[in-house]
Amino acid sequence: MPKRMLIIGSGFSGVVLARELAVKTDSRIEVWDERDHIGGNCHTSRDEKTGIMVHQYGPHIFNTDRKEIWDYVNGFMEFRPYVHRVKAVSKGNVYPLPVNLHTINQFFGRSFTPAEARDFLATQADTSIEDPQNFEEQALRFIGRELYEAFFYGYTRKQWGCEPTELPASILKRIPVRFNYDDNYHNNSYTGIPVEGYSALIEKILDHPSIQVTLNRKFIPGTDLSDYDHVFYTGPIDAWFDYKYGRLGYRTVTFEKFYAEGDFQGTSQINYCDLETGHTRITEHKHFAYWEKHADTLCFREFSKETTPSDIPYYPKRLEADKQLLMQYRSEAESLKKTSFLGRLATYRYMDMHHVIGEALDFSARFLLNLESGSPLPVFPNTENS
Ligand code: UDP
C-alpha cells in the first residue's frame, strides 16, 4: 500500500522534500499551504502594470558553494548569472558594499593598496576583543568603530529593533570584508536568478503525478492527522503548538511600493544605513532580471518591525529568551509520533535558500534511509545548537 505523506508548507524545504519522496518512494504526497500561492517568502509574480518580475517578499538571490545544490535547481530551470552589487547610503554619500577597498578608500579619502588598507584597518580594529561575542564586538574587532557606525549600527538597529550588542556575531559574518575591489555582495561560487522567477521554478519541482498541492489550507493546531503515515511541518514551530509556551521573536518586513519612469536608482538594491532614514533599503526589481527590457520601473521601500500575530514572520531574532523557548518546543516535538519539522520557520534559524534546499535534500536522504531500514525517523534536520 502506498504511504500517505502530508507536507505543511510549500516553501523550498517542503517542495524539495515532496519531490524527493515522490521520486524515491511510491508515496502519495499532499502539500498544503495557507497562502494563495506556492513558494512561501520566495514567491515571485509579474507586476500587472509593468510586467516586471517581482520578488513579493523581498529580494532573493540564489547563491551556493555546493555544486550539487546548484545542479539541482538548474535541473528544473535555467538560471541567469547574476552578481549582486549593493550600494549603501551613509551621511549623504553612496558607497559600495560589502566593505571593500573602494569603500575604505572612498570613506577615508585615501588611495590605499590592498596591503596598506589591511594595515590601516588593523589600526582601526579593537584588538582587545579576542573572541567577539555579539554583532557589535564582531564589527569593532574587524572593521573598527568608524566603518561600523557608518554602515552597520543604524541599519542593524532599524532591521532588528534592538542594540547590536544583543545580536549574535553570526549575523555580521554573513557579509564579507574585502581588501580588493571585488564588490560582489556574496562570496559563493555559484550565483544566479531563475529566468522565469522562483514560483515558476517551484512549480516545476512540484510537477509530479504523486504530488497534490492544496492552497489556502491553513494547518490548525490539534487537527487529527492520524490518516497520514507521516507529517512534515515547515511552518513556525511555536504555531504548531498553538504558542502554548509563548511566541518566538521574529522581525517582519513591510513594503511601500512605488513606480517611476526609466531607471529609478541604477541598481537593484540600495541600503540606507543612517538611523534617521526610516527604511532599511530600496529594491528596484527590474534589475534582478536585467535580461528583460521594461520602459518603466517598480521599486519597494522596505521597513522592518516587530512581528505581531497577524504578520508574516521573516527574520528569527534568536535572542536568549527565544532560544530557551525554542528548547521547550523542540523537546515536545521530539516526543511526537510520525511528525518531523523542517526548514527556516520550523527550526527557527536565519537560513538562505541554498541552506534550506541543501538541508531538505540531506534530511530526505536520512529519512528515506531510516524508513527503509526501520530505524527511528528523524524529527529535525539539525541538532539544537546547529
Ligand atoms: N547590515 C548592515 N548594513 C547593511 C547591510 C547589512 O548593518 O548595509 C547588517 C544587518 O544587521 C543585516 C545583516 O547585516 O541584518 C545581514 O545582512 P544581509 O544583507 O545578509 O541581510 P538580508 O539580505 O538577509 O536581509
Image (spheres, rainbow, N blue to C red):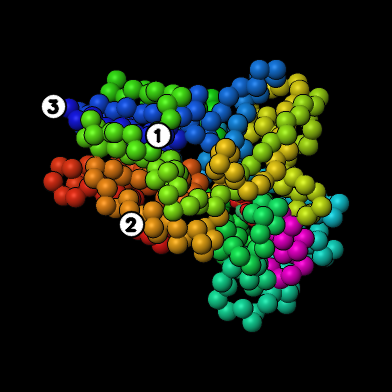
Q: Quadrant location of residue 343? A: top left
Pointer 1 or 2: first along the chain = 1
| Residue at mark 3 to residue at mark 1: CA–CA distance | 28 Å
Badge 1 marks a residue whose secondary structure is loop
The nearer-to-camera label among 1 and 2 is: 1
Find out whether residue 149 is within the magenta segment.
yes
Q: CA distance from mark 1 to mark 2?
A: 21 Å
Return the x and y of residue 73 as percentages of the image width and height. Answer: 43, 35
Give the residue drawn at x 72%, y 61%: 153
Q: Which residue is mark 2?
A: 331
Relative side of 336 to 252, left or right: left
Disc 1: which residue: 220
Q: Observer-nearest residue: 76 or 28? A: 28
| Mark 2 nearby-residue class (10 Å; few <14, some 14–19, many ≥20) | few
Q: Position of residue 277 (x, y in %)?
A: 80, 49
Q: Which one is earlier in the sequence, the residue at label 3 or at label 1? A: 3
Compared with 123, 349 (above or below) is: above
